[in-house]
Structure formats: C-alpha cells, structure tokens
Image (cartoon, helix red, strand yellow):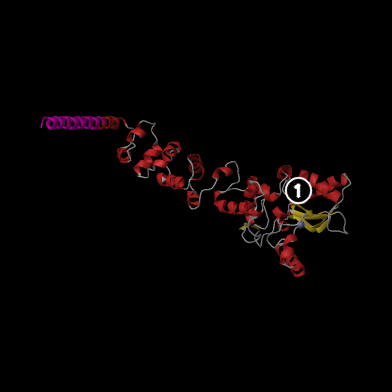
Amino acid sequence: MDDNKGLKIVLIVLIVLTIIVFAAITYLYVFDDKDNSSKSNYSKKAQEVMKEYNIYNTINDKEYSKTLEAILEEDLYNNAYLNEYYNIDYSSIPDFPNIITNLLNKEYNSNEINYIIKNYSKDLNILLDMEHIDILQFKDITNFDINKLERYLQYQDNNTDYTLEQLVTYVNIGLDLKGYSKYVEYTSEEAKDYSILVNKYHKLPDDYEPDDLVSLSYNSTYKLRKEAAQAFEKLTAAAVLENVYFYPFSPYRSYETQKVLYNRYVARDGTEKADTYSARPGFSEHQLGLAVDVRSSTLTDNLTPEHYEWMLNNSYKYGFIVRYPKGKQYITQFMEEPWHIRYLGVDLATKVHNSGLTYDEYYDLYLETR
Ligand SMILES: [Zn+2]
C-alpha cells in the first residue's frame, strides 16, 4: 500500500510540475507575442496572417518589407518565396501582390521581377500570358519591343545562328513575316519626310506624288524632288572629277508607272521572281522622287564594279546611299542593286554609311519611334 501511495504522490507531483512548466511556457510565449505586437511595423491585417502561418517572430525579427506586407494583406503568402519577397521592390501599380505572385509562380526571380515591374508595368499581360522567359537577355537591346516578344522567340527558334541584336532588329523590320503580308501605310504628309523608310513593310499612298519634282540636267523628263535633284548634280560632278561617269536612267516613277512596270515583270517572270527585283506599286522608293537608278553606260543598266565601289565610298557625301547592297538581300528583301541610290540628305546618309547597316536596320535602330 505504502509503495503505491508513494508512486501516486510522485505521479501527482510530476503532473503538477508539467502543468506549471507548460503554463509558464505558454505565458511567456503569449507575453512575448504581445510585446512584439506592439513593436511590429506591419499592419494589423498582415500581423494576423503572420500568426496564422506561425511566422510572426521570424518576420518581425527582420527588416520591414512593404512588399511582404502587401502579400500578407492579400493573403497570398507562400513560405517558399519568403526571401524573394524581401528582394522585390514594392510598387504601387494596381494588383501588385497578385502580379508578383503570378510571376513567382512562373519561376521568375526577384531580380527579373524588379526589372519587369520597372520597365513593363503597362504590358504585364504579355508576360503573364506566357511561360517563363529569359527577359533579362533583352535588357541592353535598345530596339526591343515587348509587344513583339512572341515573334522574337519564334524567330529565334528558327534562326539560332542570329545574335539577339540581329533577331530583334530583323523581326522589327518584319522579316519573320512574308513581305507585303503586313505593312504600315503612310499618309501623304508622312511621305514627304526625307528620312521615310519605304520597303515591303511600309507603303506609300497610291495617290502620293511629291509637289517639288524638278528635271535633271541629263534629261528633262527625268525628275527628282528639288533637293535630291540638286544633290544628284553635285554627286555627278564630283564623280566626273575622279573620272567616274554614270548616267541616270530611272528617276521618279509615279504609282501608275510602277504598276505598269511591276505587272510587266510579273507577266514575264511570275510574281515570286518579280518580287525579288521589282517593288509592287506603292512600295517603291522611286515614287518618293528620292531614288534614282544610274548606269555606267547606255549599253547596260548597271554600274561597273569600279563605279559601284566609288558609289559605295562617296555617295553619302552628297546625301545618297546605295540602298540594296551586296549580301544584304535577306534584309532588304531585294536582290543586290548596285545601280539604285536613295537620297537621305548628307547628315543622315553619312550616319547610315558609317553604321555599315542597311537603311532598314538603321531606321529601326535609330529612327523608329516606339
Ligand atoms: Zn531603282
């Protein structure tokens, strides 16, 4: 009996001790919690959610994060992203907590998210509608246009040998689409600009005709816009001084003239072939009154290699560029045309010449307004 009684006493003492210790711990915990509550920088709502997730102390021991607070307030907290929350800069854009949650779920890291929110807050849907992509690879590409992102990625898949710079520029030009399938149509007012880009993706109005066409001294029926005509006379005179003789043979052409020409070529060679050397009506630089074809002799519609070389190296000084140079057919969408020169004005022609780029590329990189 005595042994049993002793055992009971020991048991009771143990139970009482356990209760005391447990009560003390609970008391300390609650007390501690209250103490922290009063010191927390977070909103009441955020604090409640922290307690639900048992992260109250963990979070309040660290520096305050407005991003984390926003996430908690929306009840979007995910323990796996705790460190990322701290590294994501808070933004006041609408729906911020949901947006960053979406991006985190797509495996974007805080670095990428900060970049995206800072640069593309107005185009977030584009990124939210697709799988994770390496967005930072486009960081230093000045002509990157997020609205063309899917086209870049698709073009990249089909052209793995291009640099990122090339593929962005080429897609911006439109090279991922078939020429003439999608184009910008200018107004007559826009068409007057000396820097205007005309190619298979940029069309002139059918009725556009420059109002300042003047005759060339070589032949009074050959016309260019006044400024281009004067520059052409200077170019010709400068060439003669270096014993380079060339003659214009196709200057300004109206929409109607271009139509007749193009249709004749199509009848002769078929559309596909004709499209490699003749522009469709409305898509020809000749309609601008700023382009002229030149030849070394009346026996051929071409320049000799020597004259072509001279033209490449000197025409910019008088405001002209060789518009369809050798080896650039995949960009200009026209076969090499040594004879076709385009007036841009001395400043711009010099810049294009120095860049070593085709005008299509130059225009996209430096003149296109996005
Ligand atoms: Zn031409």
Whether residue 257 can be seen here: no
Would you identify the image quadrant in which residue 52 lies? top left
Residue 204, how many percent across, how many down? Answer: 66, 58
Q: Was residue 181 drawn as part of the magenta stretch in this picture? A: no
Residue 354, how many percent across, how many down? Answer: 73, 42
Magenta residues, start to end:
1-28
Image quadrant of ligand 1 equals bottom right
- Our reading of the magenta stretch's main secondary structure is helix
Q: Residues within 10 Å of mark 1 (few under 14, many from 20)?
A: many
Q: Nearer the viewer, residue 180 or 40?
A: 40
Q: Is residue 116 left or right of residue 202?
A: left
Residue 31, how many percent across, how many down? Answer: 25, 30
Rendered view: 340 above or below 264: above
Q: Which quarter of the rendering shows the N terminus?
A: top left
Q: Was residue 17 drawn as part of the magenta stretch in this picture? A: yes
Would you identify the image quadrant in which residue 287 lies? bottom right
Whether residue 337 can be seen here: yes
- State the residue lying farthest toward the bottom: 267
Local secondary structure at mark 1 = strand
Residue name at image x 51 percent, y 43 percent:
119
Q: Is residue 312 left or right of residue 29?
A: right
Residue name at image x 42 percent, y 39 percent:
85
Q: Nearer the viewer, residue 256 or 17?
A: 17
Residue name at image x 70 percent, y 49 percent:
359
Q: Is residue 36 left or right of residue 98?
A: left
Rendered view: 39 above or below 329: above
Give the residue at mark 1: 320
Residue 284, how many percent across, how many down? Answer: 71, 58
Q: Amino acid at mark 1?
A: Phe
Q: Nearer the viewer, residue 13 or 7?
A: 7
